[in-house]
């Protein structure tokens, strides 16, 4: 015959379960924010660089599309101390899109003007770059003489 004290224990008590859940919640609340902040700079610099490259592609596309009526092309110009940029018709100096603000905390350095000819090439030839940096993470936008636009980290 088995007595009450001889029974094998097969489950956790409610108090033990509450303590384990509370400890896990504390650990998760410490770990998740730290992991998130470490990657935030990388995400913001990359997102800003990709958005800027999309506006470069827009300017290049407009230059090619309007080649018959605009021999000067289109350009993307950064204003101020690299805080915003605009897409501009190089023939009329009319702002087509912008100004688009660069997010706070993302620093920008490199070339300040990117003009595309009616053939979609970079005005003046050569290669131009622009770096976007946040929390030590840098993403680089590169434009080659033939108008190829790449984003690298």
Image: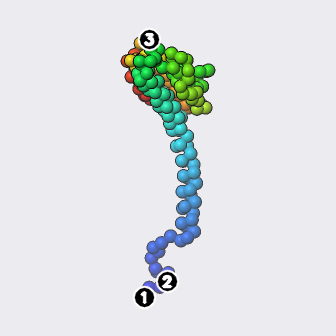
| Residue named by callout 1 | 1
Q: Residue at x 58, y 32 (%)?
A: 103
Contact? badges 2 and 1 (CB < 8 Å): no
Q: Answer above or below: position of 8 versus 2.
A: above
- Which quadrant would the C terminus be assigned to in this image? top left
**Disc 1 element:** loop
Q: Answer above or below: position of 137 versus 26.
A: above
* Foreground disc of the pair 1, 3: 3
**Disc 3 element:** loop
Q: Earlier in the sequence, mark 3 or mark 2?
A: 2
| Residue named by callout 3 | 124
Give the percent coordinates (x, y) of residue 41. 53, 34
Q: Nearer the viewer, residue 11 or 112?
A: 112
Any part of residue 92 in sight: yes
**Disc 2 element:** helix
Q: Quadrant of residue 83?
A: top right
* Foreground disc of the pair 3, 2: 3
| Residue named by callout 2 | 4
Give the percent coordinates (x, y) of residue 34. 55, 43
Contact? badges 3 and 2 (CB < 8 Å): no
Give the percent coordinates (x, y) of residue 22. 58, 60
Q: Quadrant of residue 105?
A: top right
Give the percent coordinates (x, y) of residue 70. 46, 17
Q: Is residue 100 left or right of residue 10?
A: right
Q: Residue at x 61, y 32 (%)?
A: 104
Q: CA distance from mark 3 to mark 2?
A: 91 Å
Q: Residue at x 59, y 21 (%)?
A: 79
């Amino acid at each position: 015959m088995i007595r009450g004290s001889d029974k094998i224990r097969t489950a956790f008590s409610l108090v033990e379960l509450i303590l384990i859940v509370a400890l896990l919640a504390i650990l998760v609340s410490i770990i998740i924010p730290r992991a998130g902040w470490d990657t935030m700079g990388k995400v913001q610099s990359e997102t800003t660089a990709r958005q800027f490259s999309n506006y470069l592609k827009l300017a290049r596309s407009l230059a090619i599309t309007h080649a018959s009526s605009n021999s000067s092309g289109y350009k993307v110009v950064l204003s101020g101390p690299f805080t915003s940029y605009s897409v501009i018709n190089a023939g009329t100096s009319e702002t087509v899109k912008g100004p688009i603000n660069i997010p706070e905390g993302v620093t920008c350095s490199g070339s300040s003007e990117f003009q595309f000819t009616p053939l979609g090439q970079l005005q003046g030839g050569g290669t131009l770059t622009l770096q976007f940096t946040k929390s030590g993470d840098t993403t680089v936008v590169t434009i080659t003489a033939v108008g190829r636009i790449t984003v690298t980290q």
